[in-house]
Amino acid sequence: TRPIAARDYWTKTPFRQWITTAVFNAVYVDRVSGTPAPQPAGEAPAMPAPAPSPAAGTPDPEALRAALPEGDPLAPLVQALESGDSIVIFPEGTRGHGDEPQPFKSGLYRLAQMFPQVVLVPAWIHNVQRVMPKGEVVPVPILCSVTFGAPIELAPGEERRAFLD
């Protein structure tokens, strides 16, 4: 199981890079301007229209993965899932800031389309902002709880916003 880590933050110092690489085996994601990518900073790359699969007009997962543009921020996550790794992501794009989740980013939906066989287990880390505050490298020893929900899946033809909500 591998956490997803923002490359710009977690490789800023040798210690951060060591802990995320050697200890946590993180998957790095590029998220800032100046990283090699074919699209302007802050814009998600357009996905070519994939060939529909036999199941009621749903996109073909293999075609979606093959159409992933070079430099797409999801590429390292796709590679990890193709290798059989489990990943831990914050679908908000960052650790939470409060008692309620922020709107989810579309990457979760795209991954669910590309990997319909992957089990998605929602989890809520209560007190994450105190256990792993922004700017800290290792968790602070404060009590927290993790609540796991029932596995979810993308229904055939389900729209992005409905899935993410």
Image (cartoon, rainbow, N blue to C red):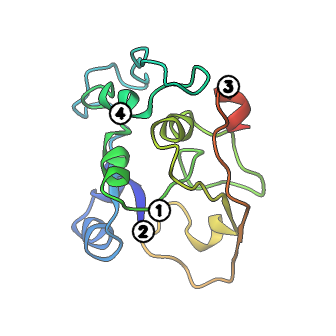
Residue 34 or residue 100, whichever sits in front? 100
Earlier sequence position, callout 2 versus callout 1 = 2
> Taking 48 as reference, is 115 above or below it?
below
Q: Which residue is mark 2?
A: 1
Q: Nearer the viewer, mark 2 or mark 1?
A: 2
Q: Nearer the viewer, mark 4 or mark 2?
A: 4
Residue at 63% over, 39% down: 154
Q: Quadrant of residue 164?
A: top right
Residue 65 got which mark?
A: 4
Residue 135 got which mark?
A: 1
Q: Amino acid at mark 2?
A: Thr
Sort mark 4 into few (<14), some (14-19) or many (20+) by Cα contacts within 10 Å. Answer: many
* Residue 49 locus on image (x, y percent): 43, 14
Earlier sequence position, callout 3 versus callout 2 = 2
Residue occupying the far front of the picture:
54
Residue 81 or residue 41, whichever sits in front? 81
- Mark 3 vs 4: CB contact within 8 A: no
Residue at 37% over, 48% down: 77
Q: Is residue 143 left or right of residue 53?
A: right
Q: Quadrant of residue 18?
A: bottom left
* Residue 156 locus on image (x, y percent): 64, 31
Earlier sequence position, callout 3 versus callout 1 = 1
Sort mark 3 into few (<14), some (14-19) or many (20+) by Cα contacts within 10 Å. Answer: few
